Amino acid sequence: MASISVDQLSVVQFICPVCLDLLKHPVTTPCGHSFCKVCINRFWDQEDQRRIYSCPQCRETFTPRPVLGRNNILVEVVEKLKETELHASAHSYAGPGDVECDSCIGRKHKAVHTCLVCLASFCEDHLKPHYQSPAFKKHKLVEACAELQEKICSQHDKLLEIFCRTDQSFICYLCVMDEHQGHDTVSAVAERTEKQNDIKEEQMKSLQRIQEKQKMVQELKQTVDTITRRSQAAVDESEKTFTELISSMEKKRTKLQQFR
């Protein structure tokens, strides 16, 4: 029998109709409805005088009082559902290294985005106004940033969105009208893009130099291999010549000995 994932089922299916909470020690009545064991027993205790017991959900009646058995399948599914909820809850809270939501009170949830206009980070719940309200339409959201204060001007408390090439520093728009007036300035995005392009160009040049060096090494290796093969061929030819010369001299010596 194929197993069913808890994610494929609605949580409502595992809510007790009496206490409206997740089933605890689930039992099933003869009509097929499930309840917490304690809830259904308390409900039927109130009907003991009439000796007629009804289902709180469909009102079907039973006589005598049914003997309730534990629903093992529901027990297993509810336990898995609890584990899933606990796991999801644990992962929604900020842990070591996570960016905390600035709007959460008490235990902080994990922030998913940082707003560069609000200068704050928000979890999924507190981020909803940015998607739903026209007032936040022009706000700029970026990936949750832990070093947000490093992007804020300590003097004017504004976003450091301008780069001063004269002083080689990031500044805010108020700094441009103050101590950086008349300096060579560009947007931080433009400067970042230019720097990235410069890095890419330098990487391409470095890669080209490496490829040229590799080519030279390969050519040198081929030259060495060629010299080695030719040297070995010369050695082999010399050995062959000496072998033939020695053989010829041996033959001549043998003939001379025959004439003595």
Image (tube, helix red, strand yellow):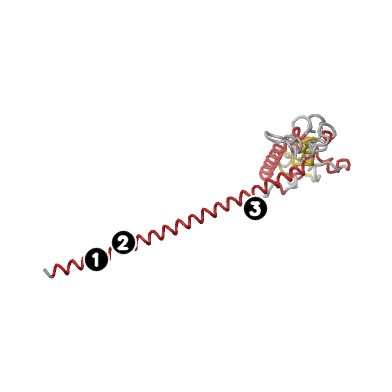
The x, y position of residue 249, in whole percent, is 22, 65
Q: Which residue is mark 1?
A: 247
Q: Is residue 92 at all visible to an observer of this figure?
A: yes
Do the numbered discs 3 and 2 sit on residues whose CB atoms are within 8 Å? no
Do the numbered discs 1 and 2 sit on residues whose CB atoms are within 8 Å? no
34 and 159: which one is in front? 159
> Disc 1 versus disc 2: distance between alpha carbons?
12 Å
Q: Which residue is mark 3?
A: 2
Residue at 78% x, 33% y is 152
Q: Secondary structure at mark 2?
A: helix
Q: Which residue is mark 2?
A: 239
Q: Amino acid at mark 2?
A: Glu
Q: Residues within 10 Å of mark 3 (few under 14, many from 20)?
A: few
The x, y position of residue 59, in whole percent, is 81, 44
Give residue 194's quadrant in the image. top right
> Disc 3 versus disc 1: distance between alpha carbons?
87 Å
Which is in the foreground here, disc 3 or disc 2?
A: 2
Mark before the other along the chain sequence, 1 or 2: 2
Q: Is residue 62 at all visible to an observer of this figure?
A: no
26 and 201: which one is in front? 201
